[in-house]
Amino acid sequence: MKRETREYNYDWMIWSIFNAGAKALDGTQKEYESLMNVIPSFRTLLHTVLRHGKPGVLFLKMLLEYLDELMSAKREGKKLCLGTFVTAKHIFYAFDNVVPIWAEPMTVFGTLALRKATAEYMDYCCEVGFTETSCSAQRGSLGAYLAGLADMPDFMICGAPGICDTNANAIQFMSSYLDIPLFQLNFPAKLTEGRVMDYHRKDLRAMISFIEEHAGTRINEGKLRDLLEEQRRQDELASELYDFMRLTPCPVPPIFQLFHYGGRLTMPGRKSYTALLKSMLEVARKNAAAGVAGTASGKERARLLMCYIDHYTTDGRFWEWLDTREISLLPTLIFNFWHEGANYAAGKASETYHIDTSNMDTMLDSLADLNSRMPMVKQLRGPYDAPHMWLDDLLGMSKLMKPDFLVYIGSMGCRNSWGINKLLQRDCEREGLPTMLLFADAFDDRVASWESIMDKLNEFMRVRRISA
Amino acid sequence: MIEQMKEAAHVLENQFVRKWREDGGKVVGYSCTFMPEEIIHAAGLLPFRLRGIGTTTLSIGDAYFGPVICSFPKCMLQLAGQGIYNFLDGAIITNGCDSMRRLEECWRKASEDYPGTLPGYYEFFSVPHKAVDYSIAFYEEELRDIIGTLETHFRVTVTDEALRKSIRLYNEGRTLLQKLDSLRFSEKVPLTGGDAMAILIAGHALPREQFNSMLTRIIGDLERAPSQSEKKKRLMLIGSASDDIDFIRVIEDAGAIIVADTVCFGSRIHSYQVDGEGEPVHALSSHYLNHSICPRMLGYYKSRLAHIMETARKAKIDGVILQNVRFCDLHGSENGVLERDIESAGIPCMRLEREYGPLVETGRIRMRIDAFMERIS
């Protein structure tokens, strides 16, 4: 790692950038334009986000709220817990003195905002013994922690055993390397059986005991109730957003996918995410009333469904490219999981989670159900073509959203999806859905540059006569 | 006798399997050590550990698996697609790791294109990644489900008595393998690492009754055999699944002898006995989850390190080879921390990433081994 990279802590740099970005529109237009001159490597992303108006501002402010809590945790005597994006965050926010760090969102902040993304931090992981073939989603931020370039966590949660080896292994590696206490949440291959649900509930309660032991406090029942009630409201709003996405043209701007799951992964159950969802709905409602698409031109030439995750390339060029090509982005697949009663859960009641805030026990059961349906946790735990799993979800979502094509991108570390994505592609094509596998890395442009990915996407669309 | 073991290590459908089938016996393959062989055995079936040995191309493996997948299950798929595993009557695929768990779908889907290559009995078996009371209870229930499927498909009954008998038999095997370990740890090692590995692999490919009987005689012979370790550096092999005797040979040709290992086909799983007194399925569940030293059991690094250091002490090793098959992040990453911790204990280590299967990288591996031997000489 270069000496200059070690000059500033990674988490502080990210906070500093988003701190400036979130306040960019608080001043005058002239001040905003002046600011653009002093943040050359962040201004493209800032423009990409802020040109969407209120939702863009609220998105940045929500992320800043998260980062503020992270940066002030040690100063306020709170405990830091590092985990992965697949864990339901409400658990941690229900503690008065625990602040969670999420490895993947922390990586994405860097890939989006830093000129060289997280390359040096990723490589640092390899310098200290982590495999280069591991997932870049964790390596990006973990490299900073392994190098001591961040406020260090007091304990860790390994949230992906049974779902993703490389994700779980990244957390295990850091725990072993730095000797930080670790708890693992483990997921069986099935989702809906009574035995499995019972297992999840026991596992979640064991995790809470672990957090309580290391935080030195008990989970706050009132806080947990508020968070879950707020989650219920957020589910209703998200459901309405999905209703809009079914329209043709889709009135939801492509980057709203990032806003939607970015909030769901960092600030679920928090008021700032509710405000973001409401503002996104306002835009969607307005566009729908006008009969225009959410793209900048208001036109829709094609509908894309990302069948795994999006591409988090520097400056958010993925969403900008979609916008300029007038391609609507439909719900990114793994971020789809529903509260019971949601329109999108019709006929799939057993796959949904149920929120019951009657008492602590029912809330913990609700949390266990929610936690076991998080992204990847729901879709990748069992055989890809088993009920409730990847193919089932993908075909179900495709039926609802009517995409013109599907695209897979993951990371080079994603054994679980690369093990079967050719099969998935074949099955989708048999269903009449043009499906493309991108040999690229959503978090590391060095594997395949964004330019080469654009070429491939353009060529695929041309050859398959999509939006011809 | 060792020659027969070597044949079993080099050939999938070995003479013992052929004889078993000629006598009307059924064979059930399994992909990982987390499937208790005792259960298959108690059903009157021959448990056979799936391997990828003898693969000469990955044309089928690469057609279904993606490019960034471990070559071990790819080789298995290749052999399955070629019909090499048609001698199996059943197969159980576990989630030992993410590459291996996807063998379940790839084999199943490949069989649509290569008809007749999927065994009649075919199951996916999910194993927890932790050893606590509720995960052991869960695993026990899953094992009972597997027993149920075996009983239904093969029209057999797995009684508690049969399970206890199998546990006793496999415990005898474990005792014998522990004796073999002692011989390998001794000052004058009477067998090469290659021969030891052949015996260990054969344990997963022969009827256990015959294996125990043969191993008893081999140990008797070895107790009187001359030393194979004179002027050789004593090494320990750690890491990913390794069942390629030729890989061991390349290491030993450089003037070393492998006297200990913790690899998946090696000495990983016989250090402890299964409780033969308690309820058998519970005893198996408790044993297989509590006594694994596979890094897929997340969060148990310190106990794995302790096991390695204790084995290294007993075997009086001069160095450690930490190897992993490319894309095996579980072993590859753990090897990184192990290297730091074992080196800090004064034991030289070498990390080696390689491909599974044919020794396409012999030159590179030999060069690395030679360099390591220079370092420790």
Image (tube, rainbow, N blue to C red):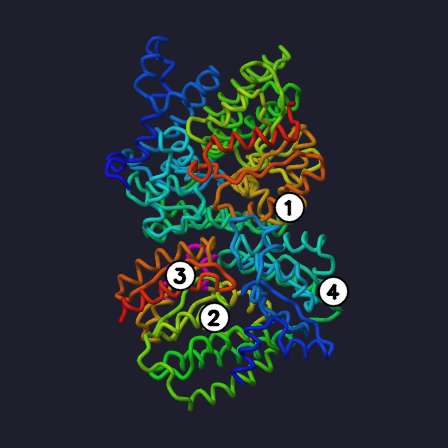
Q: Nearer the viewer, mark 3 or mark 2?
A: 3
Quick check: marks 2 and 1 in contact, CB under 8 Å? no
Q: Disc 3 is attached to a residue of which chain?
A: B
Tell me the residue that label 4 is attached to: B153
Image x and y of residue B215, in percent = 52, 83
In the picture as drawn, the residue positioned furthest to the bottom comes out as B224
The residue carrying pointer 2 sits among few (fewer than 14), some (14 to 19) or many (20 or more) residues within 10 Å by Cα, namely some
Magenta-colored stretch includes residue B299: yes
Bin the neighbour count of mark 3 within 10 Å (Cα to Cα): few under 14, some 14-19, many 20 and up: few
The percent position of residue A70, horizontal first and vertical second, equals 35, 33
Q: Which residue is mark 1?
A: A423
Residue at the spot 67% in from the left edge and 43% down from the top edge = A426
> Which sits in the foreground, A196 or A178?
A178
In front: label 4 or label 2: 2
* Amino acid on which disc 4 is placed: His
Q: Secondary structure at mark 1?
A: helix
On screen, residue B19 above or below A252: below
Q: The magenta stretch spans which residues?
A: B293-307
